[in-house]
Amino acid sequence: MNDKALYTLEYDKILQKLTEFAATSIGKEEAAKLRPSADLAEVNRRLAVTNEAFRLAALKGAPPFGGVTDVRPQLQRAKLGGALGPSELMEIALLIRGIRRVRKYVSAGAEEIEIPLLEDLVEPLIDAKPLEDEIRRCIDDQGDVLDSASPELAAARRDIRTGESRIREKLDSLIRSASVQKMLQEALVTIRGDRYVIPVKQEYRAHFGGIVHDQSGSGATLFIEPEAVLQLGNKLREHKLQEQKEIERILRRLSALVGEKAELLASDNESLGYVDFIFAKAALAESQFAVLPAMNGEGKLSLRRARHPLIPEKAVVPIDVELGGDYSAIIVTGPNTGGKTVSLKTVGLLSLMAMSGLFVPADEGSVLCVFDGICADIGD
């Protein structure tokens, strides 16, 4: 199809509107690369699946694509043995949930209306709920690894909480002493570099021993981990290292499980995006009050109250056009701003839309043709 004609007839603006109705990034990619087809069978197939989506959305509402993202790069890394982060694993779980929900949505619709093309699209999608359940058992919705992920992690975190409590108790007891309070800038316990410290005046540095972890900009205050809690701080650090080591082990294990199904999930990710693209076509049709046109390959078109889709509904003037029957050509005449150009663009753009599998803004009974090519030369 001639790219100049596509641009002249503003086909790109239709695609822009179409992408806005897609819920997923892959669906938007599919919408952006849509092009008309000159094959009548292919055009009828495109329109048929759009019609199924249109009818199903009218029956069941919008499909449940919420939370589904493009995780193909993460799946590829997992396939190659790389470790995924908690939020990346949760995105995989959301994809698996999205696959299951879309399958259920289509299956429920198929019990009430015939949608064989949509059924064929979702039938190969895998059910990986056990993998989703395992990810969710270990990671929460905020992307944090849960204590329940392993007994070792739960134990390490108990030790951390106990260690922190003991350090705080010791330091709180220290700063409550009247003799100590005069040596502090403030009677509080704070943290510097994951170590618990107290703000000591510079001149009393030697009184506390321990380690200086930071100082104020003026140098008048030193943030000291007193010698009295140094060993407790070291033990706490060990527990935190154990925690991090166990988290990494859990993430590697989950990533390996994802890697085992990476190829299938990547394929499903693309399929789900394509289904989203089809429902975007249905949503565009609804927004334009568009209808399913009858198609032919014999050069015949009959548009009834056709409306240019880029002109606001209240301003657009519908047109009736027939070609290929009693008339093989039309001469359009009239004054400037009388609608000649818009009429030409309407016929051309609606033809491109129909050949792309999109409904057209016209009345029921409209007929369009699959042309070998569409040319447009508009302007002085």
Image: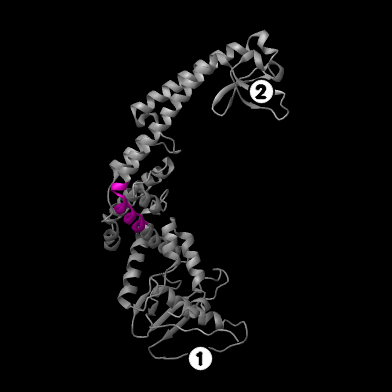
Residue 292 in picture, x, y percent from top left:
38, 70
Residue 319 visible in the picture: no
Who is closer to the viewer here, 236 or 263?
236
At x 44%, y 39%, the residue is: 143
What range is drawn magenta here?
Answer: 259-272
Please, what is the dominant secondary structure of the magenta stretch? helix
**What's under tag 2, amino acid-wise?**
Leu
Magenta stretch encompasses residue 59: no
Q: Is 262 contained in the magenta span? A: yes
Quarter the N terminus occupies: bottom left
Residue 222's disc number: 2
Image coordinates of residue 129 in percent, x first then y, are 29, 43
Q: Earlier in the sequence, mark 2 or mark 1?
A: 2
Task: Indicate the colouring scheme.
Answer: one colour
Mark 2–mark 1 Cα distance, whole angstroms, equals 90 Å
Residue type highlighted by circle 1? Ile
Question: Residue 228, percent across and down?
Answer: 55, 13
Q: Nearer the viewer, mark 2 or mark 1?
A: 2
Badge 1 marks a residue whose secondary structure is loop
Name the mark on residue 331: 1
Q: Look at the numbered disc 2 and give the secondary structure of its residue.
A: strand
> Which disc is residue 52 wearing?
none
